[in-house]
Amino acid sequence: IPIEVSLIRPTAINTPFAEHAANRLPEGEPALPSPQYPPDLVAEAILKCCVKPQRDVYVGGPAKLSAILDTFFPTVKDMVAETRMKELKKGSR
């Protein structure tokens, strides 16, 4: 049976994930950024892959930017991620 696998790479999707996260800033706000994109964009990408399979599908601009940084500037991406994680760790204490 021929099987096609597609990797859907969404950016922050508007779900209650951030609200329910254990990480909180000292002010009580979620440490995660507030999601921007509606879940139906991801659902639409999944349906498109069912009709016409693709290897990688990026949903939202930040997901595409992240992929470009991974490909062409991996060191910069690692430095940004490390800085961001340190900020989140500081805020969750």
Image (cartoon, rainbow, N blue to C red):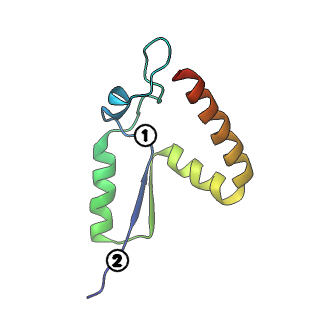
Name the residue at the front extreme: 93
Kind of residue sitting beneath label 2: Glu
Disc 1 is placed on an element classified as loop
User: Mark 1 highlights which residue?
Assistant: 12
Establish if 59 lies above or below 80: below
Q: In the figure, is residue 16 to the left or right of 68?
A: left
Residue 90 image-quadrant placement: top right
Query: Circles 1 and 2: CB distance less than 8 Å?
Result: no
Classed neighbour count for the residue bearing mark 2: other residues with Cα under 10 Å, few (<14), some (14–19), many (≥20): few
Image location of residue 50, percent across then percent down: 27, 68
Q: In the figure, is residue 61 to the left or right of 3?
A: right
Image location of residue 78, percent across then percent down: 68, 47
Q: Which residue is drawn at 31% across and 81% down?
A: 3
Residue 9 image-quadrant placement: bottom left
User: Mark 2 highlights which residue?
Assistant: 4
Q: Which of marks 2 and 1 precedes in the sequence?
A: 2
Disc 2 is placed on an element classified as loop
Name the residue at the top extreme: 27
Image location of residue 16, percent across then percent down: 30, 31
Kind of residue sitting beneath label 1: Ala
Classed neighbour count for the residue bearing mark 1: other residues with Cα under 10 Å, few (<14), some (14–19), many (≥20): many
Q: Which residue is drawn at 67% across and 34% down?
A: 83
Image location of residue 92, percent across then percent down: 51, 23
Q: Nearer the viewer, residue 18 or 9?
A: 18
Name the residue at the bottom extreme: 1
In space, the residues marked 1 and 2 are separated at their CA atoms by: 25 Å
* Labels in figure, total: 2
Establish if 22 lies above or below 69: above
Q: Which residue is drawn at 58% across and 55% down?
A: 67
Establish if 88 lies above or below 76: above
Q: Residue at x 47, y 29 (%)?
A: 33
Residue 81 image-quadrant placement: top right
